[in-house]
Amino acid sequence: MLEIRSLSKSFGGKTALENIDIEFVTGRIYGVVGYSGAGKSTLVRCLNLLEKPDTGQVIYNGENIVNFDNARLQSVRRDMAMIFQHFNLFNAKTVYQNVETAMANTTRDKQATKAKVLELLEQVGMLEYQDQYPSRLSGGQKQRVAIARALATNPKILLCDEATSALDPKSTHEILDLLKRLNVELGLTIIVITHEMNVVKEICQQIIFLEKGKVVVQGGLVDLLNNPKTRSFINSDSNLEKFDQIKDQLGLFSDDLVYEFTFKDKAVNAPYINTLIRDYDLDITILLGDIKLFNGVPFGGLIVKVAGTNQNIEAGLAYLESQGIHSERKVLT
Amino acid sequence: MNIITLWPDFLKSIIETITMVGISSLIGLAIGLVIGVTLVVTKPGAIMENPWLYFVIDKVTNFFRSIPFIILLALLIPLTRLIVGSAIGVKGAIVPLTFSVIPFYARQVESVLESLNKGVVEAAISLGFTNFQIIRVYLGESLPGIILATTITIISLIGLSTMAGAVGAGGIGDFTIRYGYQRSLEDVTIVCVLFLVVFISLIQKIGDLLAKRASKT
């Protein structure tokens, strides 16, 4: 339904996006992720042509929309709503009027408009605030209104530009839940830009990882985890990342063998450590551990110190590998 | 008290001032608003980007902004005659006052609209708003600022109108110069000053109140 073909964009000679190809499938939740300055925002702003790409195509419903005239572009934009980090509500209008204004181009019928506005406010849980002005609302409430406003034109796609980055963890969670619900109830395709790993883990089904304006990995979370370039991003909120900060205080010797084991799915609750100790005669000291859910699938990690004969260690690690557990030696100096 | 004997003249001068300021602000503010909006929306990168139109309007606005009013008064005499048929009297003052207020107000409106958070404009664009609807967002969201700019403009127009005496348009400025200054009737000067202070404070107060009512934050 929505596709980007060999799209490039630069600002004053500085490349923001280079030769991007992505296909978005209807009804899925996509995460466009990467560090700051990777070109995430530019990419999404090219989809509804808030930025015009230098070269390449944006195909929507089989048509390249890049050179559409104003009127046709406006109707495409009503199909492709957007919410923002700083909400961007109309501050001079009430909650009700914010949603109502957005409907001016789609419905002329007053009764129908009113019914739809109230329905949308109900859907996002803001019905009781309909007569308030945005300045009275909290960040999470503002984003709910922004979502209701974005849905006013019955869009097929919702673009979220760091939509939860200005919110506290609780509101973030609530907004993400709301987005998930809209995805299921309305079949809405959602494209989320974020640099926050918890957002990715909570809702994204498909991930596009950008680095310096290029797509590095495109696929599910597992694909990101298996790619050395994106592993550290995925783990950016993991307990295991603490290791580098605290390793000097742990009393380790530089020739100690310290490994990071990565467990996926069912492997998280199998007794592998026990097996290593019993069957391979290894001494194992657990230094750090972490377990988290990616879209409902558990991922675990352990950082351990291993001691034993070289032969046993090799055999033990080979055993883990055969069970689908990745191990990686940590550098101590 | 000289002012008591001159009372009918005093009242007449006030009416002249109100007429001059009233008519030239009605026309000037309307045209200035349109030009201010045009400057904002035709700027490079704006919603109706038009470099050529922007260049022309920008330069013409600067041109009229740089001419002191008393000189504009003289410069526009032929045009004034063409438009209102006479270059003197209240009628003759209205044309240069209008020409002076248009660029002043246009720049004020421009700066108020420019200060609107760009994100709000982008939200309007992303909602598939037409250009006309986006302009309405600009104006609606900037209403308090526009009201304050209008207040400042009207007050500065009252100041300019006192110079209109130079083309025989009368008004409070002309009255003060003629009686208070040239005939050294000090009480006349004092009463005129007091009147202006009260009049202008009143306008400012009304502007502030309206702006506050329009502000929803």
Image: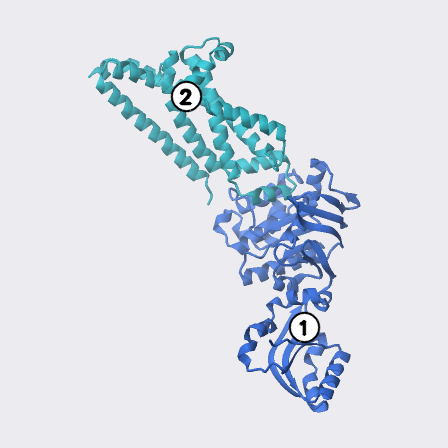
Q: Nearer the viewer, residue A34 or B172?
A: A34
Label 2 and label 1: CA atoms lie apart by 75 Å
> Residue tagged by mark 1?
A299
Write down the colour of chain A: blue
Which structural element holds mark 2?
A: helix
* Residue at horizontal 73 percent and vertical 38 percent from the top: A68
Q: Which label was assigned to residue B69?
A: none
- In the image, residue B184 lies at what x, y percent? 23, 15
Measured as percent of width and height from the top left, residue A263 is found at 69, 76
Count how many numbered circles sit on residues in the image. Answer: 2
Q: In which quarter of the image is residue A216?
A: bottom right
Residue type at the position of mark 2: Val
**B81 above or below A65?**
above
* Chain under callout 1: A
Q: Residues within 10 Å of mark 1 (few under 14, many from 20)?
A: some
Above or below — where is A323 with respect to A65?
below
Same chain letter for marks 2 and 1: no
Q: Where is residue A109 in the image (x, y as percent from the top left)?
A: 65, 38
Q: Nearer the viewer, mark 2 or mark 1?
A: 1
Q: What's the residue at 53%, 35% (across, down)?
A: B139
Along the line of sight, the residue nearer the viewer: A210 or B121: A210
Q: Where is residue A333 in the image (x, y as percent from the top left)?
A: 60, 76
Q: Which residue is drawn at 76% across and 82% down?
A: A318
Q: The cyan chain is which one?
A: B
Residue at 61% in and 66% down: A236
Would you name the residue on which mark 2 appears?
A: B21
| Position of B29 relative to A70 (above/below) | above
In the rendered structure, which amino acid carries the disc numbered 1? Phe
Seen in the picture, residue A67 relative to B174 is either above or below; the reply is below
